Image: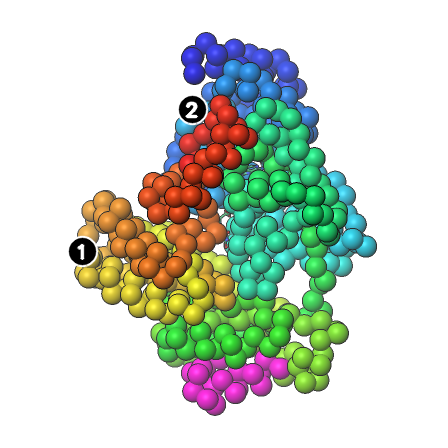
Amino acid sequence: MSIMSIAQTITELKAALPGKSWTQDTDKTAPFLSEWRGRWHGETPLLLLPTTTNEVATAVKICARYKTPITVQGGNTGLVGGQIPQGEILLSTVGLNKIRETDKANMQMICEAGVTLQAAQTAADNMGLKFPLSLASEGSCSIGGNLATNAGGVHVVKYGTARALTFGVEAVLADGSVFAGLTSLHKDNTGIDLSQVLIGAEGTLGIITAASLKLLPKPKEIIRAMAAVESPEQALTLLSHVRSGDLLSMFELIPRLGLEYVTDNMAGHKDPFLAPHPWYVLVEWEFYKRQASHTGGENPQDFAENILAQAIDSGLVQDAVIASSQAQSTALLALRENLSAAQKFVGAMIKHDISVPIAKVPDFITRANAAVLKYVKNCRPLPFGHLGDGNIHYNIGQPQNMTAAEFMALEPQINDIVYDIVDGLGGSISAEHGIGILKKSQLARRANPAKLQMMRRIKSVMDPDNILNPRVLL
Ligand SMILES: Cc1cc2nc3c(=O)[nH]c(=O)nc-3n(C[C@H](O)[C@H](O)[C@H](O)COP(=O)(O)OP(=O)(O)OC[C@H]3O[C@@H](n4cnc5c(N)ncnc54)[C@H](O)[C@@H]3O)c2cc1C
C-alpha cells in the first residue's frame, strides 16, 4: 500500500465523516494505543470514532477503495494484542453505545457494539432478566469485543460462551456492505449462519456494529461459597458433588499462591479461612422459585450448608465458608476476579489460557507443573480459573533468582512445553482470549491443517484485500 493511498484515504475519511467521528489529536489517541498490561504499544495515522453503522460502512468503503488496512477496537481489554494498531487506521466502537431495543416477551435485547458488558447486564437486570456473560473486565469490555473474541468468563459452566448468548449480529463487511443479522428468531435454518461465522473471528471478517442478545430468567437468589480442598483431583470430584441439576453457575479453582497474591498485594481483601489450604474452589448456585424441589424444599442457605457439610464429612472438602450477606458474596468473588490484577505486583508472568477435557484438568496441572519446574527451577506455576468448563489460566511467575528479562526470554520454549502437553490431552491453546497477535505462530503450527486452510479460504473470500485486522489470527 502506497503512502499516497493512505494519505488519500485519510483525506476522504475526514471529508466524509462528521468532525466528532475522527481525531488525530495525539492526547486523545494515546489511550487507544496501548493496552491494559502494557505489553503492546501501537500507532495510527487516524482514529475513527463512528457513532452509527452508516458511518462505519462509509469508512470501510473508503478504506476498501484504497485497500487501506483497519484495526478494530472495542473496550481495549483483549489479552492477545489484536486491538492495538501498528500503523493501520484505528476504528474504535466506543461511540456505538446505544441499547437499541429491549423485548421482554422474546427475552432479547439489541445492543450496539460499543455498549459495555456491564451496561448490557444492567439493562437486562432492569428488565427483570439476566444477561449472564460475566468477566472481570466487564466494566470496560464491549459487546462487540465479547462477540469478536467469543468471550467466556465465570458463567460458562451454566450458560456457555458469548456465542451461545447471541441470536445474531449486524456487521459491516470488508467491502463496506452491511450484513443485517439482528434476528429475534429462536429458530432459523436457512443455511450457513453468518452471525456465528463472524463471532470468534476476532474482527478479521467484519466489524460487528450491533448484536441481538439472548436474555435468561433472573435467579431469585444467588449463593456463593468457598471450599478448601487438598488438590485439583479433589476439586474435580467436588464438581460432580455440587452440580445439583442446573443450579451450579460458577466453579472456579484458586491455588493458595493466587489467594496470597490478592490478599498480600491488594487492599481490602482477606483470606476467608483461619488456616491456609493448598487449593480453593469458588462455587456459586442460582435459585429460582420453580426449582425449590431441586433443593429438597430447603432454603438456598440450608442447601449450600448441607451439600458442603456432606463434602466435609466425606473428606472431600477440608473447610468451607458460605457467604451470608451480599457484602460477603461480593468479597468472595473479588478474590477470584482480582487474581489477574494481583499478578502485576509479583514480577514477570508467562501466561497461557488453555482448555482440556474437564476430567483431564488435574492431569494437565500435574504434568505442566513438573515440566516447567524441570525447565526453570524455582519458577512459580499459578494454575487457576474455570475448572467447571475445563479452562485453566496456566500462568508461571519468574523465579526470584532471575530477572524479568531473563525469564521472559524463555517464553517461546515454555510455551512449547505447555502447549505440547495441551495438545497431548486433546486440548486448546486458546480457550477464551483468542489468537490475536500473541498466538498466531502457535496456531499456524498446531491447528488442524484442514481447519487452517478453510479459515484462510473464508478470509480470502470475505476480505480479499486483507484490510480488516490484517495482522490478527491468520
Ligand atoms: C482483568 C481481565 C479479565 C478478563 N477475563 C476474561 C474472561 O474471564 N474471559 C474472557 O473470555 N476474556 C477475559 N478477558 C479478556 C477480554 O476482556 C475479552 O477478550 C473481551 O471479550 C474483549 O472485549 P473488548 O471490547 O475489550 O475487545 P478489544 O480488546 O477492544 O478487542 C479484542 C479483539 O476483538 C476485536 N474487536 C473488538 N470489537 C470488535 C467489533 N465490534 N467487531 C469486530 N471485531 C472487534 C479487536 O480487533 C480485537 O481483535 C479479561 C481481560 C481482563 C483485562
Q: Which amino acid does label 2 sit on?
A: Gly
Q: Which residue is drawn at 27% across and 48% down?
A: 411
Question: Is the CB of the residue bearing disc 1 within 8 angstroms of ligand 1?
Answer: no
The answer to whether residue 26 of the structure is visible from this angle is no
Q: Residue at x 71, y 63 (%)?
A: 218
Provide residue 331's location: percent of width, then percent of height.
53, 66
The furthest residue to the bottom: 313
Question: In the rendered image, which quarter is residue 50 located in?
Answer: top right
Provide residue 342's location: percent of width, then percent of height.
40, 56
SS at circle 1: loop
Residue indicated by mark 1 = 401
Comes first in the chain, label 2 or label 1: 2
Relative depth, front residue between 316 and 123: 316
| Magenta run includes residue 208 | no
**Residue range highlighted in magenta:** 303-321
Relative depth, front residue between 48 and 296: 296
